[in-house]
Amino acid sequence: MLSHIAILMENQPGALSRVVGLFSQRGYNIDSLSVAPTQDPTLSRLTMTTSENPKIVNQILRQLYKLVDVVMVQNLSDAEAYSIELAIIKLVSSREKIEKIISQAKELEGKILDDKDGHIMFEIWGDSADIDALLASLKEEKFIEVTRSGLLGMTKGNVALKTNDQTKISYD
Amino acid sequence: MTSGGEALIKALSDEKIDIIFGYPGGAALHIYDAIYQQDRVQHILVRHEQAAVHAADGFARATGKTGVALVTSGPGATNAITGIATAYMDSIPLVVISGQVASHLIGTDAFQETDMIGISRPIVKHSFLVQSAEEIPAIVKKAFHIASSGRPGPVVIDVPKDMTDPKVKFDYKFPKDLYLRSYPILGEADPLQVSEAVKMLKAAKKPVIYAGGGVIQSDASEELVNLSKMAGAPVTNTLMGLGAFPATDNQFIGMLGMHGTYEANMVMSEADLIFNVGARFDDRITNNPKKFGLEAKKIHIDSDPSSIDKIINVDVALNGDAKLVLAQLCKEFKNSSIENADLNPWWDQVEEWRQKHGLNHDMLNLENQQDIILPQQVIQSLYKVTKGKAFITSDVGQHQMFAAQYYKFDKPRKWINSGGLGTMGFGLPSAMGVKFAFPDEDVACVTGEGSIQMCIQELSTCSQYCLPVKIINLNNRALGMVKQWQDMQYGGRYSSISYEDSLPDFVKLAESFGHVGLKVEKFSDLNDAMEEAFSLKDKLVFLDVLIDPDEHVYPMLEAGGSMSEMRISKKDKTF
Ligand SMILES: Cc1ncc(C[n+]2csc(CCOP(=O)(O)OP(=O)(O)O)c2C)c(N)n1
Ligand SMILES: [Mg+2]
């Protein structure tokens, strides 16, 4: 099963390499990873998916939280969460055919971005599995390239991934 | 107004550091100039950066304070890596300051540039790259806090040369408080879990308390003894935990694990409750985790939540600081009205195991003693002469295991060895660190002729600073521990474990640095030589003891087996 982990971390040089390094160092697999700054420029938010088993995922969460640069970690798979992925696909085909495919994929949203001499580039977003299915249905076509954002996600309702207030440590 | 270099040293002094170990070089020159112009922080010049870190590490292990090392960029930084990894594996609080090329040169493959933050990343608790000189005091404060709190560990501060430029001055202010986002430090454990643990401990018919380095880190020996006395259970210590519970107490059943005592490993296999205090179910302990403690319920106290359920799943997790959690347990134990189970049958069994294959601590009085010296006897002689009170540092190999088995540590912080990384070369430099911290105490480094040569250059440092440590060299003319494995698992094919005729004359070598060298070849000379070594109070003595080269360390757990599958001697095994 794919686990889906959201991480809030210091927007510091080196912070991302600590997170990624943890995975290689401890032999955990990362299936996808996306990262960008947040509204608060001192923090960035990272979402990753891994297909490790639940015991390992538990370890991953604890090891991540142990990193000084990691401010908060959440397993979105444990919560009621919404997730979405974006893919951009370029292939040799006809505009009509791709438009039809997009409109038939009920679970996905998409649109054509570019069309040059039969090289069609289009975007598609929605659930990762539905994107997988759409890509599979195109397997007869001549692909030029595909890029996927990796999953983004967020819990529903009145909860947020946020920092504890800064811990103030006083010395006498 | 101060420069960054001055600020760095001032901040160390404000952290109450009065000694650092290091080695200078280009990128650190401004810092060394700042050191020269003050006298609150003493700098000890070692002969290799690995030794600087090990010395700071030995200092930290013996005192409980944070050790500090200072190295230059490039080769200085890479030489420090083994030392940092050693401290990381054993959770030792260190701050390692490395010089770095000037910030505008970073990334250009400048002279003596290495990516220290990158290289050290997997072996530090945290690291800082200084990006402006003004932030140096705050970074130092954070570094010390992170290194020493929670589960301790090494912290690197990488300092580009321009950050310490004497021409760039600013107002020095050591911050009173510091701010860290989401850096939780565990204190007491969940009271519900505590009372559950006490219930289990009282109900157990065959309990064992298995205590590790975490007890020493959190200075929780007293609380461990209190709980153990109330519970009446047998207590075993890991290699890292030796001294956490007094070895001469009858409740102590010795070290457990790979070279643990027969009785400790049997107790672990047959127990119905394994109570882990500050240990981490390391593979040298559990042997095959699939065969570990199958009959036992398990309780685990740890200050690092990621240690819980990492290797062995437990029934009750007590996340918290060992000292506080043990105190909670003691209180709960006292107040609980549940009766203690009768442990007499269990102790009868433990005694039977002890009698059957327990270690012989009286080998100085062996009958039909020949003149050949057994390694165990050297440790027993050392124990006798130092009355069990010395600080013992060690290297890695058979000699380390003999020291761990036969020197009965009654106090924490007296046994100083590289348990997690197993770093040959650790013994001598760490002994220097201990001796600086405790100049009036006996400090001995138990080593082998292989290990001692890995940091032998430090004999020169000992000479410069008049450090009268005692080096007890268990000289078996071979990489003994490797040879032992080759005997057991490779049909005695001794691949690259002999130096042939190339060993130095250690006596002359020691003398060449102005030290005393003594060579012991006969058992009948052993005790006298040991006495002499320790009577020469202000001399470093290199005691080169030629021991039986064929002696193996036993017991030894069988690879892939359970904890009860042991070799007891060259002929006997339990499986
Ligand atoms: C730096 C390092 N290299 C290699 C090893 C592997 N190793 C473990 S014990 C050992 C032999 C140690 O020989 P010696 O110091 O003479 O001790 P003895 O086992 O003979 O007592 C070796 C090579 C190690 N632990 N550390
Ligand atoms: Mg040897």
Image (cartoon, helix red, strand yellow):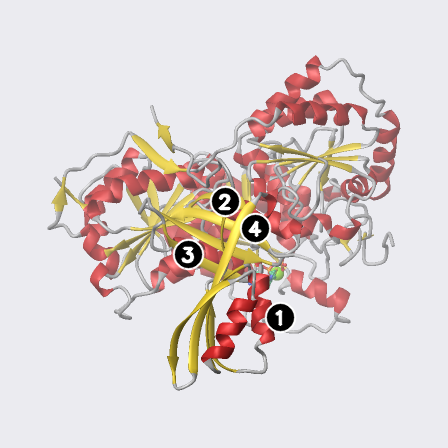
**Which residue position holds label 3?**
A35
Estimate how packed mark 3 is, as few (under 14), some (14 to 19) or many (20 or more) residues with alpha carbons within 10 Å.
some
Q: Is residue A21 left or right of residue B256?
A: left
User: Quick one: B532 or B205, which is closer to the camera?
Assistant: B205
Pick the residue in front: B211 or B247. Answer: B211
Mark 1: amino acid? Ser
Give the answer, above or below, for where B162 lies relative to B302.
below
Disc 1 and disc 4: Cα gap in Å? 44 Å
Q: CA distance from mark 2 to mark 1?
A: 52 Å
Q: Earlier in the sequence, mark 4 or mark 3?
A: 3
Dot 2 beta carbon under 8 Å from ligand 1: no
Query: Which one is closest to the eye, mark 1 or mark 3?
Result: 3
Residue B116's mark? Answer: none
- How far apart are the alpha carbons under marks 4 and 3? 18 Å
Mark 4 vs mark 2, CA separation in Å: 10 Å
Badge 2: how crowded within 10 Å, few (<14), some, or many (20+)?
Answer: many
For disc 3, does the CB lie below 8 Å from ligand 1?
no
**Residue A60 shows which numbered tag?**
4
Q: Which labelled disc corresponds to residue B498?
A: 1
Amino acid type, callout 2: Val
Report the chain holding disc 4. A
Q: Dot 2 falls on which chain?
A: A
Mark 3 residue type:
Val
Q: SS for tag 1?
A: loop
Instruction: Calculate the distance from the C-alpha at mark 1 to the C-alpha at mark 3.
Output: 54 Å
Numbered disc 2: secondary structure: strand
Mark 4 vs mark 3: give the one in front: 3
